[in-house]
Image (spheres, rainbow, N blue to C red):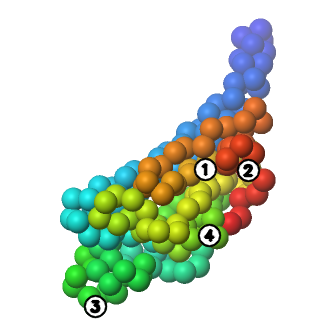
Amino acid sequence: MITIAVAAVILTLGVPSFLGLLERNQLTTNINRFISSLALARSEAIKRNQRVVVCPSSDGSACSNTGGYDNGWIIFVDANNDNSRDVANTDEELIWEGESIPNNMTLRGTSGGYNTAIPYIPSGRLAVGVSGSVRLCKDNQTDKARAITLIQSGRVRLAELDSSGKPLIGNSAMTNCST
């Protein structure tokens, strides 16, 4: 009986901590997948000396303008500089396809431009006028979120977390999970 009581106490204390660890690991894994995609797009733009774009895609072939990156994303050569992949245009080569994220998560860019496309020019910089952040949230909760900030040079920075676990965008804690 004593062994069962001790096991019950350990499970009562340990299971919530373990579930929190799994949740944090899932957030980190998914934001790192997106960061890796951005690094690939930037390096391909430099290597190919062409404009390369990351955009949301639900079919793995063409860009979609709704839903953010939740249903997946693609990386492609943007030969005509319109931030959208023309599937019939053989110059707009598909480089990579990112898988969708879990249903209880959202991956959205700020409405200033990142929600529909993240374009890199041949120097590895972001196209002029594009700036902002991309936010990954679980269950639409800011304390279960990760965020990245993209700067004009093309570099990506993972946002630090404040004491309550909310990502810091600039100097302020993230207040919502929408764009």
What residue sits right under mark 4 in the picture?
A: 112
Mark 1: amino acid: Ala
Q: Which mark is residue 174?
A: 2
Mark closest to the chain's N terminus, 4 or 2: 4
Question: Which element is circle 1 on?
Answer: strand
Please, is residue 169 above or below residue 52 in the view?
Answer: above
Q: CA distance from mark 3 to mark 2?
A: 40 Å
Mark 3: amino acid: Ala
Give the residue at x 43% y 68%.
127
Give the residue at x 37% y 52%.
39
Tell me whether the residue at label 1 lies in contact with that at label 2, contact meaning CB atoms closer than 8 angstroms: yes
Tell me whether the residue at label 1 lies in contact with that at label 4, contact meaning CB atoms closer than 8 angstroms: no
Please, is residue 103 above or below residue 2 in the view?
Answer: below
Mark closest to the chain's N terminus, 3 or 2: 3
Q: Residue farthest to the bottom?
A: 88
Q: Which mark is residue 147?
A: 1
Mark 4: amino acid: Gly
Q: Position of residue 22 (x, y in %)?
A: 59, 38
Tell me the crowding category of disc 1: few under 14, some 14 to 19, or many 20 or more residues within 10 angstroms, Cα based: many
Q: CA distance from mark 4 to mark 2?
A: 16 Å
Tell me the crowding category of disc 2: few under 14, some 14 to 19, or many 20 or more residues within 10 angstroms, Cα based: many
Q: Position of residue 52 (x, y in %)?
A: 33, 69
